[in-house]
Image (cartoon, helix red, strand yellow):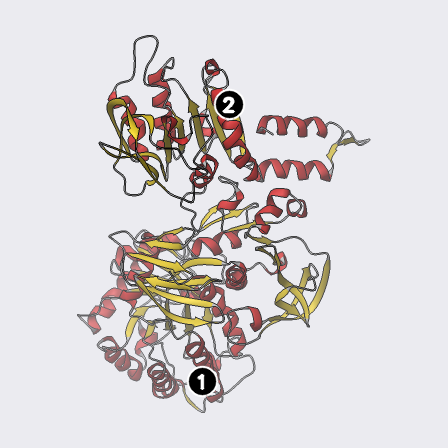
Amino acid sequence: MPHEAMINAIIEMSKFLFVETTSGVIHVKKMFLVMLFLISYLTLSRTLLLYKGSENGYGTDVLSSYIIPVLKNLYEDYDLVDVEKELPDLSEYDLVVTCYYSSKMRNAKIYLKKLSEYVLNGGKIFVINNLGAFEDPSGDSPGLSDINALLNLIGVRYEYNWRQEDVLDLKVDQEYLLKRVTLPVRKSFDGFSIFSPTVKVLMYAVTSRGNYPVIFYGERGGMAIFEHAFDERGNAVIDLGKIVRDILLFNKTNRILLLKENTHVKKTFENALFEVDTSPRYPLSYYKGVVITEDTLLEREDVKNYIENGGSVIFLGKGTHSITGNLVLEKKHLYIPENINVGYHYVSYRPAPQDAEVFMTVDGTPVSWMVKRGKGTLVYFPPDLLEKWSRGILFNEFLVSSGLIVSPIVNVFSIFFDDFPLPSYGIKHDITGTADEIFYYKIWWEDMKKLCKEYSMRPFTALITSYNNKPEYVGFLEFLQSRVTLDFLKTLLEAKDVNVGLHGYNHLPPLQKNWNPDELKISYKALKTFLNELSKSYVPFFFVAPNNEIDKASIEILKEIFPSIKIVGTSYLAETETSEYEIFEDVLILPRTTSGHYPVQRLLVETMSTLLNMGTFHYFTHPDDVISSNRNPESRNWEYMLGQLREFFRVIKRNYPWLRNMTPEELYDTFKDYFENKPTIVYHKDKINVILNSRAKLPRYFFLKSDQDFSIQGGELIYERNGLCVIEMKERKMEVLLNGG
């Protein structure tokens, strides 16, 4: 049904769905809201089919016989239009298919120009038989430049050279061949040649003069030239419908359809460099996954057909049951090191079918699960649990549900020592049994150095000089009162195996609501001068926001005084403008995911939030954690806390040995390259191509989930466990060859 007809029908139905109350207020029944939702979110993409009414049904017969059935099977809406009567607004269509016999058309130049603009703006075109606009009855016919302005955009060059020759042989892609052609046969030719290496030729006609491409297509469209697609009786010898399907689905890549805006879902897939559509731009079969929230959509034939044919649907429907208890991530079907207890949660959920694979339970009751339907899968994820901590779990469930997926990862982790060095006051704490400066610089620091060496980690330390938290510069007396602290800082600034960054002048978060911009600049200038007095060679590369809070206006002030800073550390679990990974101007905003020491399962939950999403996590701790009632709520001693931290890194090292630890400069370059030089990932029938531009740095890394055997060219499998693979890409073009190549 064309869109206008569908919408008009729903509007007519809606007249019977309004109820007027005694107060005169009009209420809309729930059914009408669902209809509006379907109009807004599941309006399918459209194809325009053009024919010439003067050709006595030639175009309509071909389009009806070979093209329309395929469009219906794809649930692709279409309009069949006589081009001699009108040319609709092409911007409403994602594909234009033309089928003409004659070469004449009124306003041919305008027609070609509109098609050129359409392709330039992302449209696709497939020409069957004749371009149909070589001549204009008015005498103002297109020239070579008008014709090539369109054809050059699909990888084709044209020059005048119409002729007829005897076809002696055909070189045909057998996958598209419908029937054999009796040869020799006399056919028409013209001056079409292909210059783009990405155009796929399906048929070459071999004559005494050479081999000529006559049926071909590429990313932006193609042609079936003159009568080469048909036999002497007018029946197709090549599968035109399959060509149209392939053009619609050309370059199937990492793209998700999200049918209702949700920040957590959107950012989850964007962090993994997926394209996210919030309304359909292509047939559903083009998408690697579809995320829906309404039960009514699950009953649609196109959605059911999508699942049956291998699609992955993530359903975020409201729960019909509820439960309160201990939420557990189940190792059996997730890429996690062990069952992980998330804590006490209330969850509204949908009961799992008996044949479901279970991802999460509450006191043993499944609350997130997956079922297989035909070749595809349906994943249920309770919307109550959609938070930052669960993004990695959602993406993990998507990976498990996918039969074949290649997903980019950053592959880097870091360890930050926030508030170090820090002022010490000569205070003895019972829990440490010694003065603060002794504990910080003789015990804690030595223990943490050993831990980092044990797990081959390079620590990033973040200097803080004061805790007075006044929005003004008042000197450095607080830091200078301990000679031990000062001497330690001097030594650290010159150390080669430690990176020292900044944690602010004091611990008051640099937010516009806290600081006058001029006072903030003064404090930073003073800090810069202070450090210059201690070391002429020290140049800070990273900054950790006090209390993990900073706004973008304050980052600009920071950069004005410290232009060398390229990384600003924040907190991933916060909900602020700087709590997502991004390159802001030339600064990497690096939200840290994981902190503290115990329980280890909490640290694992926080780590999985990004590790299972984009292959990265960032840990931070403080030397005074042991004396903090917030960060050490059970009043554990330092030996216990250190033991828990060692256990955490042991689990990470054992289960994710592919993770890289880096210097700040390397980390910055890696993230910048990840976001700015996205790989092109193309899924073919028998392989996956991964391509990087010339600016991208190697190696690059990817998650791979495949239900088929595979081999790799241009890369290497560096890890495999429970069906999840990690691939290192070593060349700018990598191929994953399916079924072993």
Q: Position of residue 356 (x, y in %)?
A: 65, 63
Q: Secondary structure at mark 1?
A: helix
Question: Residue 239 or 554: which is nearer the viewer?
Answer: 239
Q: Amino acid at mark 1?
A: Leu
Contact, mark 1 vs mark 2 (Cβ under 8 Å): no
Q: Residue at x 49, y 39 (%)?
A: 281
Mark 1, residue position: 642
Seen in the picture, residue 311 relative to 368 is either above or below; the reply is: above
| Image location (x, y in percent) of residue 137 | 35, 9
Alpha carbon of mark 1 to alpha carbon of mark 2: how far? 76 Å
Where residue 194 sits, quadrant-wise, is top left
Mark found first going from the N terminus, 1 or 2: 2
- Residue that protrudes farthest toward the top in the picture: 138
Instruction: Residue lying at the far left in this picture: please name it.
Output: 536
Q: Is residue 609 visible?
A: yes
Q: Quadrant of the C terminus?
A: bottom left
Q: Is residue 79 above or below residue 673?
A: above
Among the 4 quarters of the image, the one containing residue 104: top left
Which is in the foreground here, disc 1 or disc 2?
2
What type is the residue that disc 2 sits on? Thr
Q: Which mark is residue 60?
A: 2
| Relative image position of residue 514 (x, y in whole percent) | 43, 57
Residues packed near mark 1 inside 10 Å, few (<14), some (14 to 19) or many (20 plus): some
Examine the rendering and report whether any part of residue 579 can be seen.
Answer: no
Which quadrant is the N terminus positioned in? top right
Q: Nearer the viewer, residue 172 or 487?
A: 172
When asked about the image quadrant of residue 127, the answer is top left
